[in-house]
Each structure stands twice: as C-alpha cells, then as structure tokens.
Image: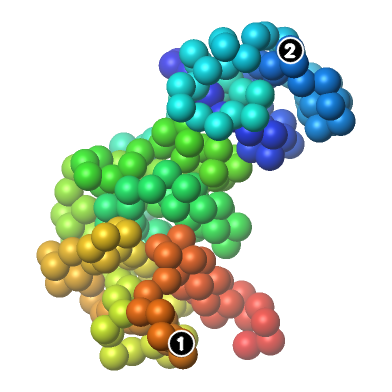
Amino acid sequence: MAETYVGGFHAVTALLEDAERKPREILLADTRHDQRARRLMEAAAKARVTVRHVGRDLLDVYAPGLRHQGVLAAIEASGVAGEEILDLPASPERLILALDGVQDPHNLGACLRTAEAVGVCAVIIPKDRAVGLTPAVRKAAAGAAERVPVAAVTNLVRALEKLKQLGYWITGLAGDAGESVFEADLTGPTVLVMGGEAEGLRRLTRETCDRVVRIPMAGSIESLNVSVAAAVCLYEAYRQRTGAGGA
C-alpha cells in the first residue's frame, strides 16, 4: 500500500487519537523541543506509534510545499474510493456531499471536517478540474479525510443521475434559488451539491438537481465561501435529522 503524509500538529494529533487508523510513524523535526512537540510525543507513546527525529529538510522532501510545522505522520494512502461508492442504497439516514469543482485545498479540507462532524456517509468530487486528497487537504481536514469516504468520479453529472435512480433526492445550492435551505426538507436519502469557488454550480450539474435552494443573506455580500456554505447546509440537514437545536 502506498503511503502519504499528513502534516501539522493538529492533524497529526487527530490521527493519533483515531482508534481505527493510526500512522505508521511520526516524523518530528529535530529542532522542535517545545511543549507542543513534547505533548505530541506523549500522545504518540500512548498510541504506541514511533516518533523519528529527522532534519527539517527531510520533511520538506517528503511533503513539498506543505506547511507541516515540523511534524509529519506517515499513513496509508487510502481515503479515495472508486465509483462503487455510488452503489450505496438510499436508506433514510444517508447524507452525501457532492462538490462541483472545488479548487482550494483548504476549502475541501474544511468541507471534509464538517462532513465528518455531521455523519456524512460519503463525499463526491470530480477527478478533473478540482483539488484531490493532497497533503494540504489532509492537513486542513485534521483527520477527517481518513474517516469520510471520498469518491473521485469521472463525471459528476452521471454520478448524480445514478444516485437519483437509487432514490436519493439531489439538492443543489445557488444564490438565486427561490427556496431557502431552511424551508427545504433535508431528511431522507439526500445529496447536497455545492459549487466551486469561481463558477458555483455548473449548468449541467444544476439541471440534474431535483431542487435548488439558497442560504438567506441579510447583508450586502452576495455569497459565502464554499466551505462555510457547506457547513450551513450540512448542519441544517443534521438539525432536521436529529432534532438538534430544539427543532
């Protein structure tokens, strides 16, 4: 199995606390002797994961361009599922997040964190013209990329059509929609579709949706960042499904 690296103290600590998927080893810069490094070493010892002290240059070689803060976790490069994930039966509790061309790794990582927090069963992303599960995404996701199945599909519209045939209700988000997300029924087997940073929902993606909703905006800003918008919609779905917040 190929390996990848997750960087940053928060993300690496989250992996050490994951009972199902721990790192093979931790690489810690030999210049880090601060309290944060000591706490990480204690967490690694508790999880029985080896910590190897290496030069910071080696960390840059393993994870080029990643702001790793002097720590990397070596993990199996799983997490990207094939299109077989689209065969998930449309049971009432299933909630899927589809992202139509998100380019920024921090946005994808934040979406994965929220998806994991509310119990999303899968996240769907396009293989092309979108960011994949890069080390920067894994860092931003703080462990969620290892807990939520992510399916990279060749054609997002075809994937949504397949899910629709299985009984999912496809709900897209667009600022010019007439219905508020807070008025929409997000219970039952649902796919929430968010557009990318530049274009929002692409035309064919929007036409594939069963309905399109909007987030009400009281101020002069026309739209929210995609990760913030995803969080609003996912937590509204969570509220409706669990009764959280007194609903």
Which quadrant of the view contains residue 13? top right
Identify the residue under disc 2: 30
Regarding residue 43, the answer to whether it shows in the image is: no
What's under tag 1, amino acid-wise? Gly
What residue is drawn where x is 54% and y is 45%? 141
Relative to residue 113, is residue 69 depicted above or below?
Answer: above
Q: How many labels sit on residues?
A: 2
Q: Secondary structure at mark 2?
A: loop
Crowd tier of the residue under label 2, counting other residues whose Cα lies within 10 Å: few below 14, some 14–19, many 20 or above? few
Q: Position of residue 168 (x, y in %)?
A: 32, 67
In the image, what residue occupies the spot 70% across and 18% down?
Answer: 28
Left or right, residue 13 beside residue 65: right
Indicate the position of residue 220 as horizontal and vertical percent values: 41, 85
**As rendered, which of 120 and 110 lies closer to the eye?**
110
Q: Which residue is mark 1?
A: 219
Judge whether 122 appears above or below 239 on screen: above
Viewer-proximal residue among 53 and 45: 53
Q: Is residue 104 visible?
A: yes
122 sits left or right of 8 in the view = left
Q: Give how far apart the Cα atoms at labels 1 and 2 are.
A: 49 Å
Figure check: 234 above or below 37 = below
Label 1 crowd bin: few (<14), some (14–19), many (20+), radius 10 Å: few
- At 55% from the left and 58% from the top, the residue drawn is 114
> What secondary structure is found at the residue carrying circle 1?
loop
The label number, if any, that marks residue 205 in the structure image:
none
Quadrant location of the N terminus in the rendered image:
top left
Quadrant in the picture for residue 20: top right
Quarter of the rendering occupied by the C terminus: bottom right
Image coordinates of residue 106 in percent, x first then y, are 47, 48
